[in-house]
Image (cartoon, rainbow, N blue to C red):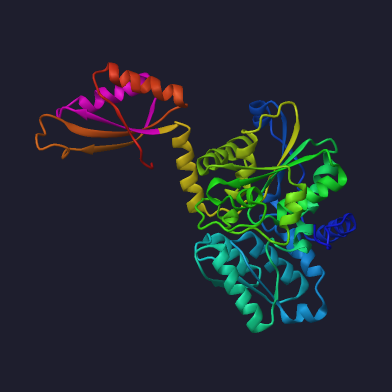
Amino acid sequence: MPEEMLTLKAFEEACDVVRQVTLETKLVYSDHLSELTGNKVYLKPENMQFTGAYKVRGAYYKASTLSDEERARGVITASAGNHAQGVAYAARCRGMKATIVMPTTTPLIKVNRTKNFGAEVLLWGDVYDEACEKAYELAEEKGYTFIHPFDDPVVATGQGTIAMEIIKELPLVDLILVPIGGGGLAAGVSTLAKLLNPKIRVIGVEPEGAACMKASLEAGHVVSLPSVDTIADGTAVKTPGEKIFPYIRENLDDVITVRDEELIVSFLDMVENHKMVVENSGLLTVAAVKQLEAKGKKIVCILSGGNMDVITMSSVVQQGLIFRNRIFTVSVLLPDKPGELQRVAGVIADENGNVIKLEHNQFVTTNRKSAVELRITIEAFGTEHKEHILGALETGGYKPKVVRTLI
C-alpha cells in the first residue's frame, strides 16, 4: 500500500466539508428489488444531488485542500460529464476559473449543465482517456491545477463520504454495491467501509464492455483495455487509476460485470417502481443485485448519477419495453382484399393485445393478389401474453414472424 493512506481522520474531515454542498440522500428501501432477490435492498440515490451525481463530493473536497496560489491559477479536468459538473460547481463555490475537457460523445445535457455552472468546456476525443491527455497538456501549458476524476486519493476520500452516510443510516449493512469507472468511488467507499466495519462486503460493478478494473485485478496490476463499448458513458474508461488501485486491491471484495441489456431493463425498474431517472452508469448496481446469490442480507446499491439526456432516455425506454416483451412487432402476410385488416385486428383484440402501429406494404411481392405484408407493433403485458397473441395469430391461419425493430 502507498504511504499516503485514505485515513479515518481524512474521511471525517471530508464529511464535514462536503456537507456544505451536498443534499442528504437518504436510503430508499426497494420493495421490488427486495422481493425479487430475497434480500433487503436499499438504494443510495446520488442521482438526486444538486449536480445530478456523487462527483461533487470529491471535487469539492479536493478544491478545499488547494492553496491560494493553486486556486488563483484555476483548475482543469477531463470528464465524461458528472465529474465535470462537480468540478465546475466546486470552482464556482470557491471563486476559481474552471476548464473542462469532455469527450465529443458526451450527452448534450452534461455539456450544457457544465457550462451553466460557469466552466469553459472543450470537446476533445472520442473517449475519456483522449480527453484526459488533452487536459494534461493544457494544465502544463496554462499552469492550471489538474483535478483528476478518480486517480487521486484526496478525490477518492471525498467520494468515500457516501460510505459514512450509508453506515450511519444502516449500521448493520451487509453488502454495498458500487459502480466502477476509473475506481475513485470504489476506492473511497470500500476503504472507509472496511475502516468502520471490516465485515461489510463491498463489491464493484463494471459494464461488460469496459471492465478495466476486473482485468487489472486479475492481472495484479493496472492494465489498459484496447477499447471500450458500453452505453454506460460515465464508466467508459479504458485504464483505471494507478494511485487508487492499491486501495481497490486491498479493500474491494469482488468485481462483477453486467451487460448493456441489463442496464436497459434496470432503467425501467427505476422509472416504474421508484419514479427515479438514473443514468446507465448509475444503474450498474441495480442490474448487479439481481446476479447475487446472497439471501436475507441488507444490501445497498449506490445510484451514482441521473444525468441522462432525453434522446438517450427515449431510446432506453423503447429498448427496455422490447427486451421485456411488452412491445413487439410482428409481420404477417395477408391477401390483398377488403376485410383482411379488420380480421387480423380482431384476432389481436380478442387476446387483449393493443395495436400501437401498423405498416401496410403492398410491394412485398409483384403479385399483389397473392399477398401484402402487414407489420403490426403490439403492446403486451409481457412474455406470456406475447406468446398467447402469436399463438392466436397462428391458429387464425397467419404465419406471424417477429421482427426486431424500434417503435
Q: Position of residue 399 (x, y in %)?
A: 25, 24
Q: Which residues are magenta?
A: 328-355
Left or right of residue 39: residue 326: left
Can residue 143 be seen here? The reply is: yes
Work out whether 402 lies above or below 189.
Answer: above
Q: Position of residue 195 (x, y in %)?
A: 86, 48
Which one is nearer the viewer's eye here, 1 or 5?
A: 1
Which one is nearer the viewer's eye here, 101 or 204?
A: 204
Q: Position of residue 109 (x, y in %)?
A: 55, 60
Left or right of residue 293: residue 108: left
Which residue occupies the extreme right position in the image?
Answer: 9
Which one is nearer the viewer's eye here, 15 or 274?
A: 15
Q: Position of residue 68 (x, y in %)?
A: 82, 79
Can residue 277 be seen here? The reply is: no
Quarter assignment of residue 367: top left
Magenta stretch: residue 347 in it?
A: yes
Work out whether 10 lies above or below 29.
Answer: below
Magenta stretch: residue 16 in it?
A: no
Q: Name the residue rendered at 47%, 27% in the picture.
A: 382
On-image quarter of the N terminus:
bottom right
Work out whether 157 lies above or below 38.
Answer: below
Which residue occupies the extreme front position in the image?
Answer: 219
Quarter assignment of residue 225: bottom right
Left or right of residue 120: residue 298: right
Q: Name the residue rendered at 57%, 74% in the picture.
A: 134
Count of residue discs: 0
On-image quarter of the C terminus:
top left
Which one is nearer the viewer's eye here, 185 or 31?
A: 185
